[in-house]
Amino acid sequence: MNENVDGNQSRQVKNTAAGASESERSPRVARSVLGESSGAKPESASWPLNNQGAGKKSSRPRTPRARRMSLSLTRVDAWSVAKVTLLLSVAAGIIQIVAVALIWALLNVVGVFDQVTQIVSSTGLDTGGFNLASIFSLGTVLSAVTILSIVEVVVATLFAVIIAALYNVISQLVGGVHVTLGDD
């Protein structure tokens, strides 16, 4: 990785020396808040724990300071957002189907469907042999939830891709989301 950063720095120096425009230059090298480069450091700039090679002789070993990096999220790849959202929404759909099957089984074991049928028949509203268990059978409920889950997968994936594209457009205008990461 240090070779890659050094290569970026040398390309940046060459582009700057050749008078290249800002858009033709290599990407900027990440620097910490203190202005230190994340690339290879000279031997005297290392942070030894036992103070070997530090140049100064001290009775107490130096502990490394936490590094902080200021980064910007300037672009989100719409295809990667689509793939991740598709897989997450498929997992959510499977969880939804299993949860509905478990809730239906619980309601059936407790006898909720039979109690509702008895309440409806005792009130006189039963006009043609009303049976809630036949209307909300397990197959009917799971079919409806499966169709709903498929629709949710498609809608969630499309919505996430649209949001990613909008973020990319807005990010070009305002520079993206700025994040400071710390090595604590």
Image (cartoon, rainbow, N blue to C red):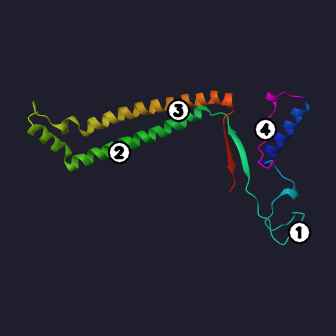
Which residue lies under the disc numbered 2? 99
What residue sits right under mark 1 in the picture?
57
Mark 3 / mark 4, whichever is N-terminal: 4
The answer to whether mark 4 and mark 1 are in CB contact below 8 A is no
Residue 28 is one of the magenta-drawn residues: yes
Q: Earlier in the sequence, mark 3 or mark 2?
A: 2
**Eye-nearest disc, 3 or 2:** 3
Mark 1–mark 3 distance (CA, rounded to whole Å)? 57 Å
Q: Provide residue 6's location: percent of width, then percent of height.
A: 83, 44
The picture quadrant where one finds residue 76 is: top right
Seen in the image, is 131 located left or right of residue 23?
left
Query: Position of 150 compared to 76: left or right?
Result: left
Q: Residues within 10 Å of mark 4 (few under 14, many from 20)?
A: few
By secondary structure, the bulk of the magenta-drawn segment is best described as loop
- Magenta residues, start to end: 19-35
Q: Which residue is mark 3?
A: 160
Disc 3 residue type?
A: Ala
Q: CA distance from mark 4 to mark 2?
A: 49 Å
Q: Amino acid at mark 2?
A: Ala
Circles 1 and 2: CB distance less than 8 Å? no
Q: Is residue 161 left or right of residue 130?
A: right
How many residues crowd around disc 2 within 10 Å: few (fewer than 14), some, or many (20 or more)? few
